[in-house]
Structure formats: C-alpha cells, structure tokens
Amino acid sequence: MRRLVLPLAAAAAFLGAALFAHARAMPAGPTGPLNVIVLLIDTLRADHLGMYGYARPTSPRLDAFARRGLLFKNARSQAPCTFPSVNSLLTSRDPAHFLGQAGGRFGIPKRFTTLQEVLGERGYKTMAVSASPIVRKSPHKLNPHGGFDRGFDVFDEQCLQRRAPCLARVTQELLAQPAEPFFLYLHYFDPHYAYEPPDEVRHTFTVPGRRRLPRGRDLDTVSESYYKKGPRIELSEEDQRLVVGLYDEEILFMDRHIGLLLDWLEEQGLLRRSLVAVVADHGEEFFDHGHVFHCRTLYDAVLRTPMILSLPGARRAAVIEAPVENRDLMPTILDYLGIDATALPLEGQSLRPLIEEGRAVRERAFAQQLGFRSVADRSHKLIVDLYTGGFTLFDLEADPGETRDVLHQQRREFRALKDALWAHLDAVEGGAANRTTLRRAEESLAALRALGYLN
C-alpha cells in the first residue's frame, strides 16, 4: 500500500558537527528554582509537524516555540504504546520493567522512583492534568486500577478524553496563585483516535463535505479486519487521505490552543521562570507498513516523536541532531535543577553535555514492543523479532520511510547495531533470550486487548 505521509521539506543546514543550528541569544534566566512544565501529547508523530519538515502547516505555534528553544530532531519513544511509554518517561527506566504487572495493572509500581516524587521531596508542588484514559489516578474501563498519581499533590482527571482548551482552563485554575516552585504534567489527548476535529479547523486539510469514512469501513472495523480472523478490508487512497487529513486537523486545533496557553504563561511571567518540555508518548501509523494506530510495530511512524526544551537562561537556541530518548528527559530536568541523581538507578542520560558542549551522551536509541526490539543511530535502524530471530535493517538517510531492508548490503552497520542491541538487552532485560520479558509483554498486551484498547 502506498505510504501517505506528505513529502518532507528540505533538511536544515547544520553548523560544525551538525549538532547545532539557528543559534540565537536567549534572555537571562531567573535567580530562584525553576518550575518544570511537561506537555505530553498523546499519539503525536514527529513527521506531521512543521519543525520536522512536514509540508502541511499543522503546528505553527509549536514551530515558533521550538525556534526559541532546543529542538531534538532524532528523539524516540521507548515504546509505541501509552503504557508503558509514559511509565518509562516519568522514571527514566526501560519499558520492560513495567510489563506483566499483577492483575493487569498499568501504573508505576512503588519500587520505581518517579520524577514527581524527586521534585516533591525537594519542595515542589506537583500537579498533573490528564485527558488520557490510561494515565489515570482513578479506575477507568481502559485502566481499571489507575496508578499513575503517586508523587502528585494534585492529579486532575476532569478533562478525560477532552480537548486542549479543557487542559488550559484547569491549568489556569491551578496556577492562578502558583505555589512556586511547581512541577506540572499536562497529558493532551487531541490527536488520538477517533479523529473528530472541531468546526474551528474543519476542512483545513480535508475536502469539504467529507468528515467520515463510509459505513462499515471505519478505522475500528478496518483494524479488526487487520488483526482478527476474517476478510481484510482495505481503504481507498481517497479514504486514507481523509484519515490523515482529520488527524492533521486535530494537531492544528491542539497546536492553536497550546499556543494560547503558552501566551497565558508568558503573560503571567511563568515561562521565564520555567523549564518547559514538549514530548509525545508515541506516534501513529496510517497504513505506512500495512498497519493502523499504534502498539504494534517499531517503525519510526510510532517511535519518532517530538522533543522541545525551553531552558530559561540557556546560552542558545538550537536544532540538535544527535539521537536522544524520552528516558533522557528526567535526568536532564534534574541536572538543570541542580539535583544530584547519582543515587537513582536512572537508565536515561542527562542531555546537558549535548546541549551546552555539543558532546553526544548516547550514540543510539532503543525501543521495545511485544517480541520486537529496535536500535537506531543517526543513520540506521535495526529491528529484531525475538520470536523468529529475524532482523530488518533500514538506512534512514536514504530511506526515512523504512521501506527497503538493506540487511544484506550493509553488513558492517548490521553488526555494529546488533552488538549494541544485544548489550542493551543484557543490561535491562537479562539477555535477548529471556522469555520472562516476552511473557510479561504478552500479558500486558492481552490486558490491553481484553479492555478493548486493542483489536
């Protein structure tokens, strides 16, 4: 099936070692402790944003925010599913640690230290506003046990599966008289299926008169035909374009309202006193490799996610090309707050040496889903199926869409990435042949499927 991602714009030119570009002076920072604001956008793939070269103007406000801060061009999530991706991001631990919890739980077990706990112990007021049915404090049909609230003084759930304006309203209420320093985690849900963009952005990227797929060919039905027994339903190219257009309109609406929230934060004087991160838990597949939605594969459609950091007082704004992981966010935040994290068993790396000195802190990014594992450097990506032992190698520079397997043509790259992946699995999973991890992954996937989250 033809890939429907729009062509990428020409890549930005990079200075020196190609780690930094567009350097600009930034204002001096505050003298007191920085607040921390993390905006996590559920189901947002990087290559549907202008800052990552997308042809459609889906993200003008976030693009402008990125131009004033630090944009990481090769950031990747460690799992293509909200659980356990968010668990990993908030603990700087590998997703494998959170699989197969007793009773099918999805939350963060007490034995793992969270970012909010560390900050709370140091006097931060910790707050979360989540629209996600997975990242919950209280039970929900898609997460019967909750379990994501530990370490938060406030965990607000009133915006469940509601749009960005709801999160902005609750944020303004929480920060009307802010107790500083504070940590605020915002979990947006707008781009997640079902794609039903509001009238405000209607037909920006879709044909007038078309808002839905034909009856019996909606994405739920299509997904069922893909992953359950029965005749496979294929959408026409016109219908696929509609799906992508609706998703892009969802991004545009969210982008506008995140922009309005950033304006409000600036008016309140909070932006200049806050470290702000914009990230995503995973992306989304639109028939790119014969799949829809997420939680299935390790292609960059679901792994390559945006990462923007705004650091008051930083010496420069920059575009950074080196590979980074979502696991690196927690140690980076703690480093910039001057909090010693050496006693914590973090598996991510602080990006401060990369930001300030151009010194890479990692050469590769890793990810996992069910029996698949992947490793990517700046030019290549290797995926292994641990059940079959089969490998697939992609040359990301020549083939960013990951359409051609070059395993047999580029053996040196294959061996280097395989050795790195095997070492990673030894360190975090007890080796590539550890069937316990695979069993736990299967149990977690079965739990999601039983709750109706997956077909």
Image: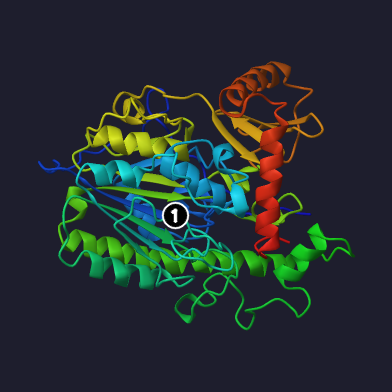
Residue 305 visible (yes or no) = no
Relative to 402, residue 227 above or below: below
Please identify the residue farthest to the front as the structure is shown. Answer: 102
Image position, residue 399 (x, y; %): 66, 37
State the scheme by which the image is colored: rainbow
| Depth order, front residue of 117/92 | 117
Residue displayed at 22% across by 60% down: 265
Q: Secondary structure at mark 1?
A: loop
Image quadrant occupied by the N terminus: bottom right
Amino acid under disc 1? Phe
The quarter of the image holding the C terminus is: bottom right
Q: Is residue 312 above or below residue 41?
A: above
How far across and how far down the image is residue 447, in percent?
67, 56
Residue name at image x 49 percent, y 60 percent = 146
Asked if residue 192 is positioned above or below residue 446 in the image, the reply reads below
Can residue 175 be seen at all in this image of the molecule?
Answer: yes
* Residue shown at 44% from the left, 54% from the top: 148
Q: Nearer the viewer, residue 390 or 97?
A: 97
Image side of residue 447 versus residue 34, left or right: right
> Percent from the top left, x then y, of residue 380?
62, 29
How many discs mark residues in the rendered view?
A: 1
Question: How packed is label 1: few (under 14 Cα within 10 Å), some, or many (20 or more)?
Answer: many
Single out the residue that lies furthest toward the right: 231
Query: As rendered, which of 279 and 51 lies closer to the eye?
Result: 279
Quadrant of the rendered structure where residue 25 is?
top left
Residue that label 1 marks? 148
The answer to which quarter of the image holds residue 304 is top right
Q: Residue furthest left?
A: 31
Q: Name the spot of residue 300 as percent of width and height, x first.
A: 61, 43
